[in-house]
Amino acid sequence: MRPTHKRLSTLDIFRELDKSNCRECGLPSCMAFASQVYQGQRQLDECPRLDPAVLSRLGGKLAAGSEAPWSGEEALSKYQARFGKGVDLAGRAEKLGGWMRAGRLVFHCLGKVFELDREGELHSDCHQNPWLQVPMLSYVLDSAAKDASGDWVRFAELKGVSSWVRFFEHSCVQPLLEMARQDPVLLQDILQLFAAQTGLDGFEADASFLLLPLPKIPFLFTYQAPDHEFPEGFAVYLDRTAEDNLDPESLFRLGRGLAEMFRRIACRHGLPLGAG
Ligand code: SF4
């Protein structure tokens, strides 16, 4: 399923801009900026000349309904139907970084144990939702299971993801940035809950966290607090092999699923975050 862009086109966004081509956003023209906003590579508020009233009106349109409705249950059923035709779980376990126990494929996800039976049902003590379950089944069925290369890239740099870039930014990166702004310590505590590795070498950031939502699909989060010299920064990186190990839609759903799970935990701790 591909996302739709019915609400706003590049031209719709361009019409609302200053059109001075002042380059303060770092791009050569307002049209280039509109195009990148449309693709999810830039946020509207990166144009310092945009009227706050326009920002509020346009931002709402970009966010609301910009993603096609998704039935997680339906997607889950489709993947489970493929298990009904017979899947060599033992063969897949060896490739995917899992193992077999009592006829089930067992693997670690976010530091928790998940078991997959021959009917495609997932079992775990960990709370489950379709945003994570569907990518898990896709991973078991279709992943090339390449080992991580250590080449960290932004989601937008992966091949084949262009239709999903703006949604990943809106539903994964921005909610996590909002959490980091409101309570960076709580976000770090939540990441630790899911067995994140910290203090990674080679990243110029105040904090970096490596999470394994699937055995061969690492996510790296970096956070830079604002200071007098640099603005606040938050970034999500994936290993380059993610493009071989999971399809673009499942990668997006995985990122969104993580952000949604963290948001719910943060809300339970009293952080006033909006609905995801
Ligand atoms: S900062 Fe705004 S007005 Fe200036 S070029 Fe970029 S989009 Fe256009």
Image (cartoon, rainbow, N blue to C red):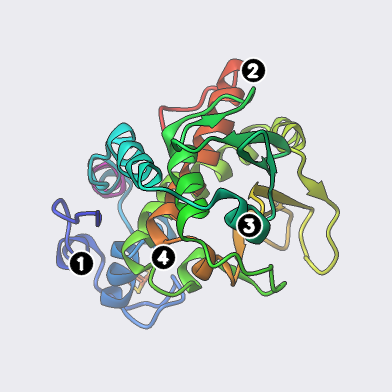
- Residue on which disc 4 sits: 41
Q: Which image quadrant shows ligand 1?
A: bottom left
Q: Amino acid at mark 3?
A: Leu
Measuring from the top left, give residue 251's x and y in whole percent.
Answer: 47, 55
Regarding mark 3 in the picture, which secondary structure is present there? helix
- The residue wearing badge 1 is 10
- Label 1, label 2: how many angstroms apart (C-alpha)? 39 Å
Q: Which residues are magenta?
A: 54-61
Nearer to us of marks 1 and 3 is: 3
Left or right: residue 197 compared with residue 94: right
Label 2 amino acid? His
Q: CA distance from mark 1 to mark 3?
A: 41 Å
Asked which secondary structure carries label 2, the reply is: loop
For this rendering, which residue is in front, 243 or 255?
243
Counting residues from the start of the chain, the first of labels 3 and 4 encountered is 4
Q: What type of secondary structure mainly makes up the magenta span?
A: helix
The residue that mark 3 highlights is: 96
N-term mark: 1 or 2:
1
Residue in the picture at 33% in, 63% down: 37
- Verify CB contact (< 8 Å) between mark 2 and mark 4: no
Q: Position of residue 197 (x, y in %)?
A: 81, 48
Sequence-first disc among 4 and 1: 1
Give yes or no for residue 119 being in the magenta stretch. Answer: no
Give the foreground label among 3 and 2: 3
Q: Amino acid at mark 1?
A: Thr
Q: CA distance from mark 4 to mark 1?
A: 13 Å
Tag 1 secondary structure: helix
Q: On the rendered structure, is 187 left or right of 203?
A: left
Residue 96 image-quadrant placement:
bottom right
Residue 56, magenta (yes or no): yes
Q: Which mark is residue 269?
A: 2
